[in-house]
Image: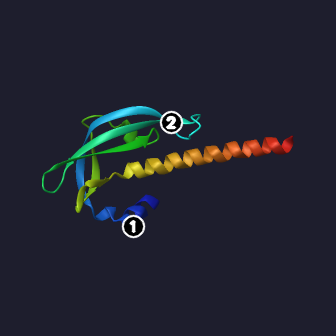
Amino acid sequence: MFIEIWERLRGYDKWVQAEATVMSSKLAEVQVFNSGAAKEWRSVSTLAWKDEAGKQRTASYEVSDNSPLFQLYECQTVNIRFNPADPNEFYLPGVLKSRVMSANKWTVLTVLVAAVALFIMFIH
């Protein structure tokens, strides 16, 4: 629901819909915080699509392992929207959802660790 509202506010719903093909997909374990203690798996994929003039466009996106887009591999297709004023600019809804879910996961984990630390401090 919130993502649909965000799409309308940003104007993505007015962009041109296209079918994009995954050209490459690479997995990497990345640090989430500067400490290096928290890590998660991410997929960096490159998409290709044709704009309204038939010109091939490419772009990359990154998602964490909690996204359905994480499972995409070469030659699979996905629906995107691209900006008709700048066809290199694209929108893939699952990317935003992945970022929100990842941020939520790490926020909850951080709050829990802080709560446990405060609890231990107060009982001693």
Q: In this rendering, does residue 112 appear at all?
A: yes
What is the tally of numbered marks visible in this picture?
2
Q: Amino acid at mark 2?
A: Glu
Quarter of the figure with the C terminus:
top right
Which coloring applies here? rainbow
Q: Residues within 10 Å of mark 1 (few under 14, many from 20)?
A: few
Q: On screen, 76 above or below 83?
A: above
Question: Can you tell which quarter of the image residue 13 is in?
Answer: bottom left
Q: Amino acid at mark 1?
A: Leu
Query: Callout 1: helix, strand or loop?
Result: helix
x and y percent of residue 96 in the render?
A: 42, 52
Q: Residues within 10 Å of mark 2 (few under 14, many from 20)?
A: few
Work out which residue is located at the far left of the displayed protein and give it: 53
Q: Which residue is mark 1?
A: 9
Q: Nearer the viewer, residue 66 or 118?
A: 118
x and y percent of residue 16 in the render?
A: 24, 59
x and y percent of residue 76 in the render?
A: 27, 38
Whole-Å distance between the Cαs marked 2 and 1?
30 Å
**Residue for point 37% across, 66% down:** 8
x and y percent of residue 59 in the render?
A: 28, 46
Q: Which residue is mark 2?
A: 40
Query: Callout 2: helix, strand or loop?
Result: strand
Q: On screen, 34 above or below 54?
A: above
